[in-house]
Amino acid sequence: MKNFIYTFFFFSALVSFSTYSNGRNTFNYYGIGIQNIGYDDIEFSPNIEKTELLPDLYSKNTSGTGVRAFMGHHFNQYFAVEAGITSHGKANFLVYREAIDSEGTINKETIHRGDFSTISGDIRLIGTYAIGKKMFLRAHVGSLFWNNEFDYLSGNVGELVVKNESDTGASLLTGIGLGYSFTKNIAVSFEFENTKIANIKTQTISLSMMLRF
């Protein structure tokens, strides 16, 4: 992960201080995006049947909201290279107990909880194709470099514990989307992408704003 961060800032310096080209379709850009990230296949209690937890209850959330900051360089109207850093939305689980107080209010007492949390960096090759004067198609392929913390339930039902695994790795990243240019310097894109984090299939829907310099 540290190696990617060094590469990211080197890339930033290279783009920022490179000689600006007067070519029509050669430019640098920066952006930020909000993401909905889903981990549909995640399992926080692989060896435990939920009914065995009764009277305790179990719930899980398999998606979360993340944020990505990025920068890129367009070589021409068709190709660009882009690098970014993402704080991924968390998936999580909760084992809890419900109790009703004297006023009839239901209160939740947390017994166990845990998260699937990730910080990542990426480098991707972007392909673009204009549709008219304002809209454009966008597709990308690249590598995702991730650092992940995974909490999960382990042990017997009567002696449950939350274990944690930390892992780092790299995964193939692919995506496709649609963009719209409000002006020469401002554009937005709506994209869908696939990858894997810690062997968990990860799907992301993102809305990004890009500023051209």
Image (spheres, rainbow, N blue to C red):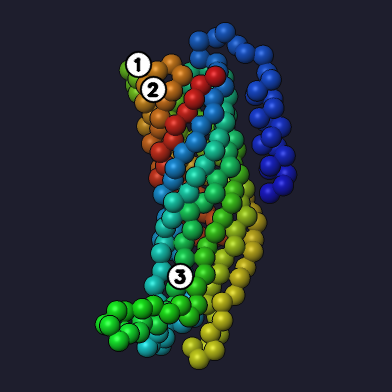
List x then y, in percent, for residue 40. 41, 61
Badge 3 is on which residue?
Answer: 93
Disc nearer the start of the sequence (2/3): 3
Q: Nearer the viewer, mark 3 or mark 1?
A: 3
What residue do we see at 31% from left, 84% from top? 100
| Residue pictured at 72% horizontal, 39% vertical | 6
Q: Determine if residue 143 is in view.
A: no
Between discs 2 and 1, the one toward the N terminus: 1
Q: Nearer the viewer, residue 21 or 114?
A: 114
For the residues bearing labels 3 and 1, Cβ distance under 8 angstroms: no
* Image: 194 above or below 70: below
Q: CA distance from mark 2 to mark 1?
A: 8 Å
Near mark 3 (Cα within 10 A), the count class, few <14, some 14-19 or many ≥20, is many
Q: Which residue is mark 2?
A: 181
Q: Secondary structure at mark 3?
A: strand
The residues bearing labels 3 and 1 have C-alpha atoms spaced at a distance of 46 Å
Is residue 62 in view from this perspective? yes
Q: Amino acid at mark 1?
A: Lys
Secondary structure under badge 1?
loop
Residue at image point 55% right, 16% down = 26
**Mark 1 — residue?**
133
Quadrant in the picture for residue 58: bottom left
- Which amino acid does the dot numbered 2 rest on? Ser
Under circle 2, the secondary element is: strand
State the quadrant of the C terminus. top right
Q: Mark 3 is on which residue type?
A: Phe
x, y percent for residue 110? 46, 77
For label 1, the crowd category at 10 Å Cα-Cα, with few meaning under 14, some 14 to 19 and many 20 or more, is few
Q: Residue lying at the far left in this picture: please name it.
A: 104
